Amino acid sequence: MATKRGASASTSAAASTSLVKRSRVEDADDASSGSLITVSSSGKDKGLVRTVKRTSGLSDPILSLSGGHAGEILDVRFSPDGQIIAAAGADHTVSIWHTYAPNDHITSLLSHSKAVTCLAFLRAPSSSPLLLSASADGTIILWSPLAPPPTNKVRRFRQHRAVVNSIAPCPTDATIFASGSDDGTICVWNTDERKPLDVLNVGYPVTAVEWAQDGSSLFVGGIDNQIHLYDLHRKQVVYTLSSHTDTISSLRLSPTGSHLLSLSFDSTLKVWDVRPFAISNGNGARGGEESQDERLTGTFTGAAVGGNDSLLVRADWSRDGKRVVSGSCDRTCVVWDMEDMKGRVVYKLPGHRGTCTAAALHPREPIVVSSSADGTLLLGEIEP
């Protein structure tokens, strides 16, 4: 994983606590109304009884999933149907959990020889999900996580010579994915073949990759602080997005394919309009390298990224594109409202005892899951 190169940002305690939505409560279920009766146990509202409307199928509004890892958890993902959760551990394992009750640890996937850095589910039948895991050992493994071992390990992919920091499934072909590594290369793979279809050498450690909507070009972020769109057929940079001042930590395309989310060690979250010919300069000309700054839709704060541990922090869009969620070095999980692209922080969820390394939004319900360097996952519901 790439090392942070700039100064870290901090978030004040006052700013954090003013947005806290997870209050300490003693709770009891009100089964007849589908609500939760809560009694505040701290602050000026101590002893106040109130009813909170439940918004999901979780057994409790907040759940801690622990015991699956012996160290840091570096990434977390929901399966496409939202029924299971996969978590990537620095202990070389991938843990698989049930999202809903009993929220149990189903299994651990064991085959990497170093830390598992990132995960991605592929499009597949709900009964037979497929999961990619990338590792600091330089390899990527395709898993059938619900199959019994050893049949759960489908294939190992070898090409990279250093830590693999990012993997991204192709939006137009369920058998294609891309990976980016500290070795300065991007590989494009077919899940049916052990060797890459293509290798692109960019010359610097790659920390984030994400496909464009057309499935023929790739957004690449790294320690040069920039985001480059590569045409994979011509092997050329189409344009460069330059606004971040430190390493790119995460890239995610919106569900519509129109906007790109970037998170950086400069502790800013940026949203870019990446539609073809979406911008114009003052003379009415469209496109062109000189006008790429106009693609920047907004710059938002709220998550501290690139702290002393220099861990890559992951972000995610909701399936409807109305919210964005991210981890943070201040131990919180941050949720932004993106419906109007104004990036208003609506939740800053505490609970972790270490850097919140990744967060993901459930594909069907208002549920967020977050992973942490403290070795735990937090699963909770938010307002729709």
Image: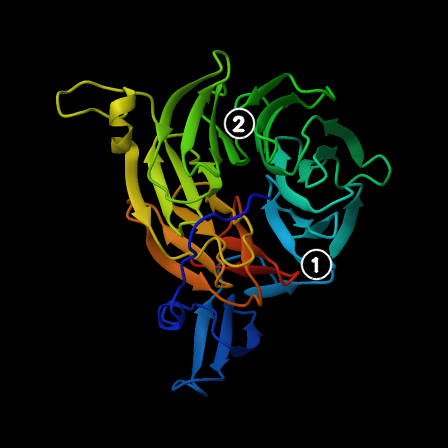
Quarter residue 111 falls in: top right
Residue closest to the eye, 300 or 384 = 300
**Quadrant of image for the C terminus:** bottom left
Residue 148 lies left or right of residue 337; in this view the side is right
- The amino acid beneath tag 1 is Gly
Q: How far across and down, in percent of the image, does residue 319 sit?
A: 47, 41
Residue of label 2: 203
Label 2 or label 1, whichever comes before in sequence order:
1
Task: Judge left or right: residue 179 versus residue 131.
Answer: left
- The quadrant the N terminus occupies is top right
Q: State the residue lying farthest toward the top.
A: 234
One can see residue 226 in this view:
yes
Label of residue 22 in the image: none
Name which residue lies at 56% across and 21% down.
200
Q: CA distance from mark 2 to mark 1?
A: 32 Å
Q: Is residue 163 above or below residue 289?
A: below
